[in-house]
Image (cartoon, rainbow, N blue to C red):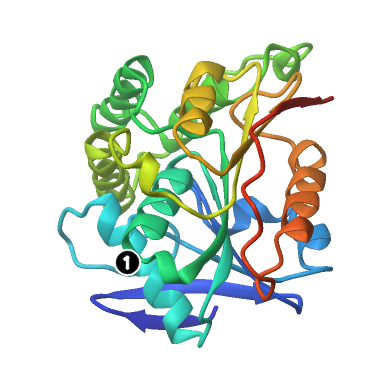
Amino acid sequence: MPKIKVGDAVIHYHEQGEGEPLLLITGFYGDLYNWKKALPQLSSSYRVITFDNRGSGHTEAPNAGFTMAQMADDAAGLLEALDIERAHVLGWSMGGNVAQELVLRHPEKVANLVLMSTYAVEPNRSRFAIDAMINSVREGASMETFQTMMQTWCSTESFFRGKASVCELGESCDRSVLNGLARQKAALDAFDSRERLHKIAVPTLVIHGDEDIMVPLCFGERLAAGIARSEFEIVRGAGHLLPSKGYVPLVLDFLAKHPIDAMAAEARPPGISERN
């Protein structure tokens, strides 16, 4: 379980593969194990770095609130501690917020950007839904209940087809886990990059599922429209949790076109394509 001191945090991270560095930033309540299905393909071509954001997993941080900017500084500090000058950066959901802050605050660290299932400002409906999920745990619901509620927002109708719904008692949540969730949620609520998107100058790929109800497709479209050097890809039949077979080929194609050691390429005109 490798850990490294970065500022006031001790970051839990993993590395796998060789080649140009690729930093993966996970979403709300997630940890580095969320990437396990994508890692075999990505690490066959890249040195992939995964880590736990402060507020989740095995990363240790002060018992206090934090912002998306601090989470981005954690990511930049991790790259610095690993002697990585520049990296490809991929962020999913809340990790896409962190990735945006990373490129805005530390542009020298980011060669290219991939933003998946994310936005420039949090959807109001999702803000209320996640607050209700957190409050249910405060009021005695188990983490299993929380995870089920989150799954219903992040997966597609077809995912649940034929599955039985089971309601049973579970163990209550560790308070430190709940506190981490609440602090990440506060950082989510405060994030807004709408007036800063024009400052993102690196080649950017925005990927979104067309059945995403946590972050509807229009949020991905607006995000891509605000970034000059962006491409937009739709994964058909996908919800908020994008299947690795839907996004990994898109990511590999994009990164292959934008190697870190190449001279800055001409901006590509934005386009929309589909992948089943």
Q: Which residue is mark 1?
A: 73
Q: Is residue 72 left or right of residue 218?
A: left
Snapshot quadrant of residue 55: bottom left
- At horizontal 48% and vertical 39% (from top left) the residue drawn is 227
Relative to 192, say whether 276 is above or below: above
Q: Is residue 213 visible?
A: no
| Number of residues whose C-alpha sits closer than 10 Å to that of mark 1, classed few (under 14), some (14–19) or many (20 or more) | some
Q: Position of residue 159 (x, y in %)?
A: 73, 20
Q: Is residue 194 left or right of residue 21?
A: left
Label 1: which secondary element:
helix
Q: Is residue 108 visible?
A: yes
- At horizontal 31% and vertical 31% (from top left) the residue drawn is 134
Front-most of residues 264 and 253: 264
Relative to 92, say whether 255 is above or below: below
Q: Position of residue 248 (x, y in %)?
A: 77, 47
- At horizontal 33% and vertical 70% (from top left) the residue drawn is 60
Q: Is residue 70 left or right of residue 80?
A: left
Q: Amino acid at mark 1?
A: Asp
Front-most of residues 135 and 142: 135
Quadrant housing the C terminus:
top right
Quadrant housing the N terminus:
bottom right
Q: Is residue 144 left or right of residue 242?
A: left
Q: Position of residue 92 (x, y in %)?
A: 54, 44
- At horizontal 58% and vertical 20% (from top left) the residue drawn is 212
Snapshot quadrant of residue 261: bottom right
Q: Position of residue 177 (x, y in %)?
A: 33, 50
Q: Residue furthest left?
A: 64
